[in-house]
Image: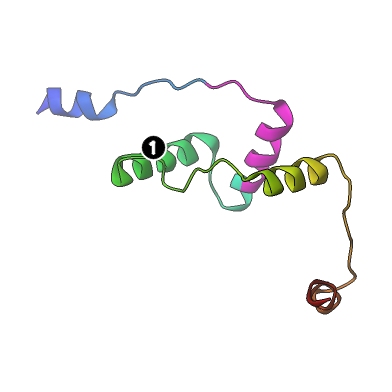
């Protein structure tokens, strides 16, 4: 019985390097969800195990989408709207 208890209390350390801003923003979102970073990583790893792979689709964007993503990340060609109705009206044009 003691060896089984000991096994269940063991843990492994996971380390990852990332941009500090990404970490801070993600941790703020996790806090709103009532999770800490360790809990979120455990959930992610369990989903990897469950799905036998990454639990969401990974794709290389097509050239048009890649261009749009690059432009938006650079702050180019962005359009702001006061409300959802205005946004949909703009998209319908």
Q: Residue at the spot x=48%, y=34% of the render?
A: 38
Residue 58 percent across, percent down from the top left: 50, 43
In the picture of the structure, the residue carrying the numbered disc 1 is 45
Q: Position of residue 25 (x, y in %)?
A: 70, 40
Instruction: Say which quarter of the image contains residue 36.
Output: top right
Q: Is residue 26 magenta?
A: yes
Q: Nearer the viewer, residue 50 or 36?
A: 50
Residue in front for this viewpoint, 56 or 12: 56
Q: Which residues are magenta?
A: 16-29
* Position of the C terminus by quadrant: bottom right
Q: How would you classify the magenta stretch by its main secondary structure?
A: helix
Q: Residue at x 69, y 43 (%)?
A: 66
Relative depth, front residue between 81 and 66: 66
In the image, is 41 to the left or to the right of 92? left
Q: Is residue 84 left or right of 61 when viewed as pictured? A: right
Q: On the image, which quarter does residue 18 sit in?
A: top right
Image vertical order of residue 79 relative to residue 66, above or below: below
Query: How many residues crowd mark 1 within 10 Å: few (<14), some (14–19), many (20+)?
Result: some
Left/right of residue 33 with respect to residue 25 in the rendered view: left
Give the residue drawn at x 49%, y 41%: 40
Q: Position of residue 80 (x, y in %)?
A: 89, 62
Q: Is residue 41 above or below residue 76?
A: above
Left or right of 57 in this view: 68: right
Q: Position of residue 72 (x, y in %)?
A: 81, 46
Q: Residue furthest front?
A: 63
Whether 88 is drawn above or below 18: the answer is: below
Q: The N terminus lies in which quarter of the figure?
A: top left
Instruction: Return the residue found at the far left.
Output: 1
Q: Residue at x 74, y 32 (%)?
A: 21
Residue at disc 1, secondary structure: helix
């Amino acid at each position: 019985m003691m060896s089984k208890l000991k096994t269940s209390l063991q843990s492994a350390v996971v380390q990852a390097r990332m941009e500090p801003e990404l970490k801070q923003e993600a941790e703020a979102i996790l806090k709103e969800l009532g999770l800490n970073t360790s809990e979120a990583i455990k959930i992610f790893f369990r989903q990897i195990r469950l799905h036998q792979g990454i639990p969401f689709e990974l794709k290389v964007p097509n050239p048009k989408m890649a261009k749009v993503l690059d432009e938006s990340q650079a702050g180019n060609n962005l359009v702001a709207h006061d409300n959802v109705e205005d946004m949909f009206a703009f998209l319908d044009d």
